[in-house]
Amino acid sequence: MTKTFMFGGGGVELGPDGAPVAFLHPRDPGRVYLLSEALEPWHGPDHSWGSGFVITPEGSGRWQTANAVNWHAGGVTAWHRPRADLELTIDRRTDGDHWVETYRWTNTGDRAVEITGAGRERAGT
């Protein structure tokens, strides 16, 4: 199941976990904007749009597929748990002519967590 959200002159197609799987534009319908595992065998879930990693002094973690997804008008919110004490909430939505992504970290543990590094994939061509 995918869902498409229009913005500006084109749109974005989101996969079941809320991550973009395609960007679309009517003036260039054949253009592939994102890599996919179907076209590039090495391009698996750890390279999909929005997947990533976090580094702390206590250890690191990765996020790929969302633990929970909530679809809403104009977008989606997805929750990830890259470490037992860290939750990552990703909100993706349209805002008129723009596609907006917000990444919010929440410490769910009982000790302070220092994030010393983080990165995410943008699997464009």
Image (cartoon, rainbow, N blue to C red):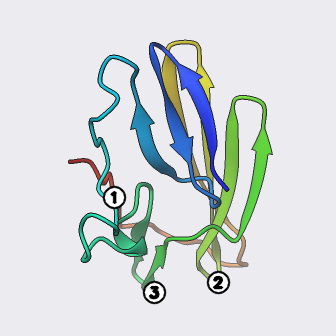
Q: Nearer the viewer, mark 2 or mark 1?
A: 1
- Nearer the N terminus, badge 3 or badge 2? 3
SS state under label 3: loop
Secondary structure found at label 2: loop
Instruction: Report the Cα–Cα distance between label 1 and label 3.
Output: 23 Å
Residue beneath the point at 73% across and 78% down: 110
* Sequence order check, earlier mark of 1 and 3: 3
Instruction: Label 1: state its secondary structure.
Output: loop
> Residue 22 lies in what quarter of the image?
top left
Q: What amino acid type is highlighted by mark number 3?
A: Glu
Question: Nearer the viewer's eye, disc 3 or disc 2?
Answer: 2
How far apart are the alpha carbons under marks 2 and 1? 22 Å
The image shows a total of numbered marks equal to 3
Report which residue position mark 2 lands on.
84
Residue 121 has which mark? 1
Mark 1 neighbour class, 10 Å CA radius: few under 14, some 14 to 19, many 20 or more: some
Q: Is residue 116 left or right of residue 4?
A: left
Instruction: Tell which of 119 and 98 is nearer to you.
Output: 98
Residue of label 3:
58
Identify the residue at horizontal 29%, vertical 70% (top origin): 43
Q: Residue furthest front?
A: 30
Q: Residue at image x 61%, y 36%?
A: 4
Classify 76 as above or below 118.
above
Asked whether, in this view, residue 76 is left or right of residue 20, the answer is right
Instruction: Specify the quadrant that holds the N terminus.
Output: bottom right
Mark 2: amino acid = Ala
- Residue 78, placed above or below residue 42: above
Left or right: 56, with 92 as reference point: left
